[in-house]
Image (tube, rainbow, N blue to C red):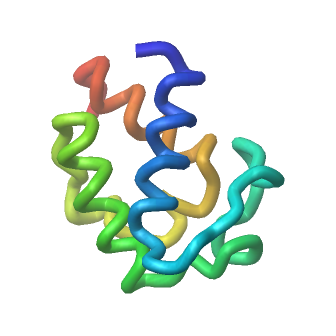
């Protein structure tokens, strides 16, 4: 899977997670999602669940932190490692 595809899927996941309309047009791969759109631990758990389903991966318990989902780039790196079988 190409990185651009991962970014688009992550944006779709984030949009689906927020019940109200959220604009991600200005969100780049390095935008701080905590600062920019208010990702918190509750939203984070839902994002993790959706990422696991969408990419058919299992997120390790020790990686369930806000730092893992702080930016699209960090999330994409994590997903790529999981898809490549790197632990």
Quarter in which the C terminus is drawn: top left
User: On the picture, is 20 further left or further right than 17?
Assistant: right
Q: Which residue is depicted at the point 42% across and 78% down?
A: 43
Residue extending furthest toward the front? 21
Residue ranking furthest to the right: 26
Tell me which corner region of the image, top left, top right, bottom left or bottom right, holds residue 64. bottom left
- Front-most of residues 25 and 30: 25
* 63 or 29, nearer to the observer: 29
Instruction: Tell me the residue at 50%/24% (across/down).
Output: 5
Which residue sits at x=70%, y=42%? 29
The N terminus: image quadrant: top left
Question: Which residue of the protein is positioned furthest toward the top in this rendering?
Answer: 2
Query: Residue 9 in the image: x percent, y percent?
Result: 45, 38
**Residue 52 position (above or below residue 15):** above
- Residue at image position (56%, 35%) is 7
Q: Nearer the viewer, residue 33 or 68?
A: 33
Q: Position of residue 79 (x, y in %)?
A: 38, 36
Q: Quadrant of residue 35?
A: bottom right
In the image, residue 70 above or below residue 10: below
């Amino acid at each position: 899977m190409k990185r651009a595809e991962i970014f688009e899927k992550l944006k779709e996941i984030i949009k689906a997670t927020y019940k109200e309309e959220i604009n991600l047009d200005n969100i780049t791969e390095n935008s701080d999602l905590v600062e920019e759109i208010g990702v918190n631990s509750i939203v984070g758990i839902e994002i993790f669940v959706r990422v696991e389903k969408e990419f058919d991966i299992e997120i390790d318990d020790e990686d369930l932190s806000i730092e893992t989902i702080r930016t699209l780039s960090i999330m994409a790196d994590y997903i790529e490692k999981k898809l490549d079988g790197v632990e």
